[in-house]
Amino acid sequence: MQGKKWENNNLIFTNPTGGSLSYRTAYDCFKRVMVKLCLPDTRFHDLRHTYAVAAIKSGDDIKTVQEKMGHATAAFTLDVYGHVTNRMKQASASRMEQFISTVSS
């Protein structure tokens, strides 16, 4: 901390005095980490999509994901991430089909 120079802005990632990081600083750091980890070239914004897909797949309800993403409506969230829920529906149908086949045997 910088004592009297510290800006308490309740930020998670800050510059040395507690202020906002510039976009360029965050972007350059992210790109360096991706290269160091030998991961494919990825946009920083892709992390939002990765989070949303992981949240839905792990069972978060769409309203919770909508609120966390800051979307105005759950309908918008479903429009953007509906492909995930469709796969989940298909997987659920397959599990139910297997269950029914074991019960009816």
Image: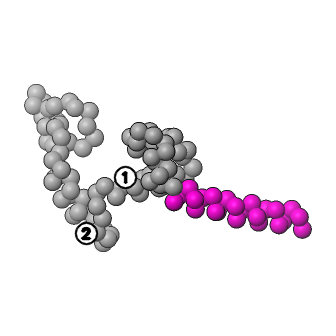
Q: Which residue is disc 2 drawn over? A: 35
Residue type beneath disc 1:
Arg
Residue 75 seen: yes
> Residue 21 at what x, y percent from top left?
17, 45
Q: Looking at the image, which is closer to me, 47 or 13? A: 47
Residue 55 seen: no
Rounded to the nearest whole Å, what is the CA distance between mark 1 and mark 2? Answer: 19 Å
Q: Residue at x 28, y 61 (%)?
A: 43
Q: Which residues are magenta?
A: 83-105
Q: Tell me the number on the disc at residue 48.
A: 1
Residue type beneath disc 2:
Val
Q: Secondary structure at mark 1?
A: helix
Q: Is residue 25 above or below residue 35?
A: above
* Quarter of the image where one finds residue 2: top left
Q: Residue at x 16, y 53 (%)?
A: 25
Q: Give the quarter of the figure containing the C terminus.
A: bottom right
Q: Residue at x 64, y 62 (%)?
A: 91
Instruction: Give the main secondary structure of the magenta stretch.
Output: helix
Q: Residue at x 16, y 43 (%)?
A: 15
Farthest left residue in view:
5
Foreground mark, 1 or 2, reads 1
- Sequence-wise, the earlier of marks 1 and 2 is 2
Q: Tell me the number on the disc at residue 16.
A: none
